[in-house]
Structures are given as structure tokens and as C-alpha cells.
Image: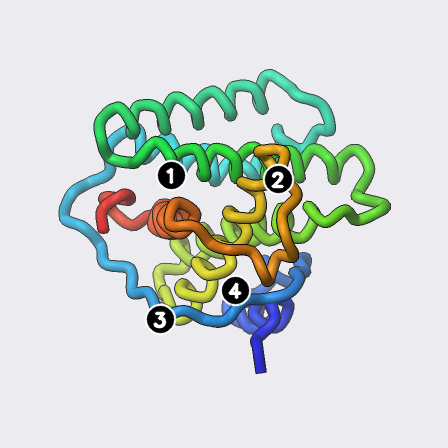
Amino acid sequence: MKTTRREFIRRVGVALGSLMTMRCVTCYAPNPEPLTPSPSDTPPTPDWATLRECWVDLDNPALQSFEDTDFSRDLRQRHDDALTALVESGEIDASVADEITAAFEEAIAHIQRQQATCYIALPPVFAPREDLVQQAAILEEMATEGDIDPETVAQAQAALEQDIAWLAQFHAGEVPSELDEIEVTPDAAEAARVLVKLLLGDQGFGDS
């Protein structure tokens, strides 16, 4: 039987305590081969560190506004600048950076929309946006716990791959298929891999 995202979050919630008691998620994808984070001896560059800070700042109270603020505009700019620098230095492909940018923009849009309307009528974009934000929070919390379960990380990466692929199409003005049926492109898969390492605080972040 296929594991649902809701069941997955319940299991993670047992491990992470109160963080997940406030969260809910939708359908889940088949598990890939377990991913074991392998710390690199190469410390992250300032651009990788900035990129991670931007994703962690999605939980910053200063972002909890339905309108763009100086904080949200600065957050987008810092994220764009860090990605641009990483592309220019050859540490990440431009097409993968585009996937990460679209995901980040949609995450901010989700937070702002929740402040404005709480999604009274849930559109299709709600599920991948919500899951993206929640998976990011799970991974960042796991990094602070220090006890990382490879299977849980693999499941989070599988969810992110689908979310990123779906949101990239939506962000481009396309009409994506059902989330569980979305085709995960190589760029979306790589973007998910990068984000997993990034949010886990894995040294070298972009390294394989």
C-alpha cells in the first residue's frame, strides 16, 4: 500500500515532538532508495550559507504578512543573489537554480496567501505549496536534532521532488497534472537533492 504524506508526517511528528503537532499534509509518493547524507570536508561558501538562511527564514515572523514588506523583498533578493553567484561559480546549473527559485517564490506566496485568506477555498496549488514549506521545516528541525534517519530523509526528498516539479510548471503558467502523477524532471530531482542537503546543514551543501 502506498504511504500517504499524512501518515509520513505523523511518524515524523513522533520523533520531532511538538513541531509536527501543528501541521498537516496531503498525499505521499512511493519511497526512493534511502538517501544517506554524507558530510563533506569542504565547508560551505558564504553563498550556500546565505541560501540556507533564506529558506530557514521562511519561518521568520517578519514574513507573516499578506503584503510584500521590506523583509520579504530583501529575502527574495538575497535568495536570488546567492543563487546567481552559485550559478556563476559553476556550483549549480542555471536550470536547477530556476527550479529552486520557483519553489522559493511559491513558498513565500503560500505564506502570504495564508495570512490574507487562509485558503478558504483550497486551490490545487495549496497541497504542493503546503508540503514544500512543511518538508523544509522538517529537514531544518532534523538538522538541529542531530540524529538523521536516512529513510526519513529519502522520503522527504521524494516529496520535494514532486512538489518542486509541480510548482515549477504552475509558476511557469502551465496547468500541472495531479501531484501524484507529476513527472519529476532531472532538474527537479537535482533541486530537491540540493535543498535536502542545504536544509540539513550538510557541509559543502551542493556537493554530491
- In the image, taking residue 96 as reference, residue 168 lies left or right, namely right
Q: Is residue 200 visible?
A: no
Viewer-closest of 187 and 34: 187
Q: Closer to the N terminus: mark 2 or mark 3?
A: 3
Q: From the image, which quarter does the N terminus lie in?
A: bottom right
Mark nearer the viewer, 4 or 3: 3
The residue indicated by pointer 4 is 16
Viewer-closest of 18 and 71: 71
Could you tell me the amino acid type at mark 3?
Answer: Glu
Alpha carbons under labels 1 and 3: distance apart? 22 Å
Placement of 30 over or under 18, stated as above or below: below
Q: Position of residue 183 (x, y in %)?
A: 51, 55
Q: Are marks 1 and 4 in contact (CB under 8 Å)?
A: no
* Residue located 46% across and 61% down the image: 158
Please, which colouring scheme is shown? rainbow
Could you tell me the amino acid type at mark 4?
Answer: Leu
Q: Regarding mark 3 in the picture, which secondary structure is present there?
A: loop
Q: Position of residue 56 (x, y in %)?
A: 48, 40
Q: Which mark is residue 170?
A: 2
Q: Which mark is residue 196?
A: none
Alpha carbons under labels 2 and 3: distance apart? 28 Å
The residue indicated by pointer 1 is 96
Mark nearer the viewer, 2 or 3: 2
